[in-house]
Image (tube, rainbow, N blue to C red):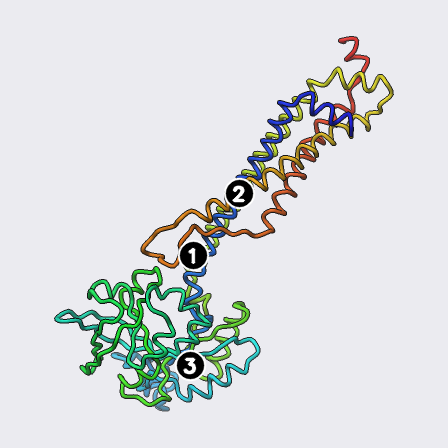
Amino acid sequence: MSIAKTHLVSKLRQTLIAALGVTFGIGSYITLVSFMTGLNQMLDDLILNQTPHVHIFNEIKPTEEQPVTLTDGVAGSFNVVYSVRPKLSQKKIHNAKPLMEYLNRDERVKGAIPQVKTQVFYVAGSIELGGNLSGVEILKEEELFNLGDYIVKGSARDLHNTSNGIILGAGVAEKLSLEVGDRVQVTTVKGDIFPLKIVGIYQSGIVEIDNVQSYTNLGTVQRILGEPESYITDINLKLFDIEEAIPIAEAVEKQFGLTAIDVQTANAQFETGTTVRNLITYAVSITLLVVAGFGIYNILNMLIYEKMNDIAILKATGFSGKDVQLIFMSQALIIGFLGGVIGLLLGYGLSVLISNTPFDTEALPTVETYPVNFDMAFYVIGISFAMLSTFFAGYFPSRKARKIDPVRIITGI
């Protein structure tokens, strides 16, 4: 080990270059993978935090069995039915409250909460805008679906304490020039007009949603529609394990005859984009590590060629080929460890710098700085790869040193 240290110190410039190769390779890997996975996680949360794991509702659709199919006289024949009409059904979920109680008793379900959705017109002066109004239990929405994170003005508690309050979408508020404390009139499809007080502004970061979506209390929407407290159009489930969404959705559809959409189905395209982004991130990260490994190999290989005379002297004085190989392997591992540790510190420092850099965008007002993922697994992978790459980078050149004939080197043959 002392001989390995002497060799490293005597060629300090080459040692530093080799260590810097490891340092910048590992530092770049840590910085890139931390930032990219943090960004991907932010985009995932932007969608998944606002999307129920299972969305249950009573879908309006055509009757599966038309009268002609129930007629014995035409059984077995080919029938063509024109102008199929949707079956007569209500939007509400029958026995919604007992259903929610049943779902809340399921150990896989973290929470089942109701909603009443309706289409309305927002009216301010002579301007009318179409949109969607959702009646919710706002505090439960905040607890289970982080709705409070997207309320940029006001709070969920303000809506809970105001019976005629509304949290207006940011796009709607901007178009109608409305602020917290103002009043907006809501018109239903039947033409009824209801004044509501704006107690908050909601901004999801998705323009299509912010231009139409607003929230009010569950009882407020029921009164606007002239419906009783039992009137529920949607039930949203939050699960402990998102992987249980598909089997739960299938079970609800089969048992209760309702439509249940799981989060994977609802966001299939988004999940595909996330997978592609992750593949690109890890592919680039691995490429950085591999390039750093080849750089280390080249430097150590040249180092051994420059040390031919030293190797010959060592063998001539009684060192075995195994001892010589061990000396150069020790050099490689020392370079890998020092370069890897400094690389981790460099990557962590750059990640902290990025995480404190202001991220100012109107689309995501709740995000103040760039997202960074400080997952300890990245650092374990980084130092492990540094040691592994330097091991192989030192192993192959050291095998050549092991086989060197000292007589031929000393005599110059």
324 or 397: which is nearer to us? Answer: 324
Residue 209 picture location, percent across and down: 31, 65
| Separation (CA) of disc 2 from disc 1 | 24 Å
Please report contact status of discs 2 and 3: CB closer than 8 Å, yes or no.
Answer: no
Q: Residue at x 73, y 17 (%)?
A: 308
Q: Amino acid at mark 1?
A: Leu
**Label 3 residue SS:** loop
- As displayed, is residue 239 above or below residue 325? below
Q: Quadrant of the C terminus?
A: top right
How far apart are the alpha carbons under marks 1 and 3? Answer: 30 Å
Q: Nearer the viewer, mark 2 or mark 3?
A: 2
Label located before the other in sequence (2 or 1): 1
Circle 2 Cα neighbour tier, 10 Å, few/some/many (<14 / 14–19 / ≥20): some
Please indicate, yes or no, whether residue 61 appears anywhere in the rendered image: no
110 left or right of 400?
left
| Contact between labelled residues 1 and 2, with CB atoms less than 8 Å apart | no
Query: For mark 2, what is the residue?
Result: 349
Residue 388 spot, x, y in % from top left: 67, 39
Distance, label 2 to label 3, CA atoms, is 52 Å
Q: What residue is disc 3 on?
A: 258
Which callout, 2 or 1, points to the residue nearer the camera?
Answer: 2
* Residue 346 horizontal side relative to residue 48, left or right: right
Q: Is residue 102 left or right of residue 93?
A: right
Disc 3 residue type (three-letter): Leu
Three-letter amino acid code of the residue under disc 2: Gly
SS type, badge 2 = helix
- Of helix, strand and loop, which one carries label 1? helix
Residue 43's disc is 1
